Image (tube, grey):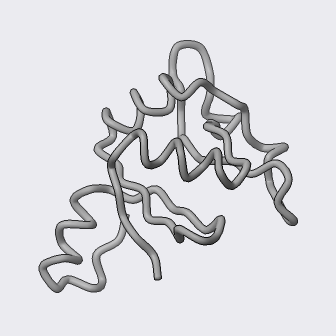
């Protein structure tokens, strides 16, 4: 069952326990702009880490807060998706088609 969190310590602990690292999509990571953020799992089968650039956790969480994101993740797996906090709120109120 997937869970959702915005807690930086929980996100970092979960990601690192699965071999995850903070990253940005390489084509969007230019100059002073971090770009689109992701958590990459370089050792995972079918990983697309070649298209990602590793960044610091500070850069990751600065962008995470600026874009008002939340992490949808499987505590016992590697599945994760960054979603807008507004999407989480809408889904909590019954709008199941809400997406971002």
Does 72 sit above or below residue 69?
below
- Please state the horizontal and vertical placement of residue 72, each as a whole percent of the image: 44, 64
* Residue nearest the observer in this picture, 75 or 43: 75
Residue 24, quarter of picture: top right
Q: Residue at x 36, y 54 (%)?
A: 70
- Please state the horizontal and vertical placement of residue 96, each as a whole percent of the image: 27, 85
Q: Residue at x 33, y 49 (%)?
A: 6
- Image check: 27 left or right of 80? right
Q: Residue at x 51, y 62 (%)?
A: 81
- Image check: 70 left or right of 56? left
Does 87 sit above or below residue 40?
below
- Image check: 75 left or right of 29? left
Does 20 sit above or below residue 80?
above
Q: Residue at x 39, y 59 (%)?
A: 83
Give the residue furthest to the top.
32
Give the residue furthest to the left.
93
- Please state the horizontal and vertical placement of residue 23, each as a whole percent of the image: 64, 37
Residue 3, quarter of picture: bottom left
């Amino acid at each position: 069952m997937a869970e959702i969190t915005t807690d930086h310590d929980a996100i970092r602990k979960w990601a690192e326990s699965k071999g995850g690292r903070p990253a940005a999509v390489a084509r969007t990571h230019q100059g002073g702009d971090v770009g689109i953020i992701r958590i990459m799992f370089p050792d995972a089968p079918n990983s697309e880490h070649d298209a990602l650039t590793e960044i610091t956790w500070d850069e990751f969480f600065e962008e995470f807060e600026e874009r008002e994101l939340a992490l949808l993740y499987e505590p016992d797996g590697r599945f994760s998706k960054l979603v807008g906090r507004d999407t989480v709120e809408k889904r909590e109120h019954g709008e199941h088609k809400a997406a971002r």
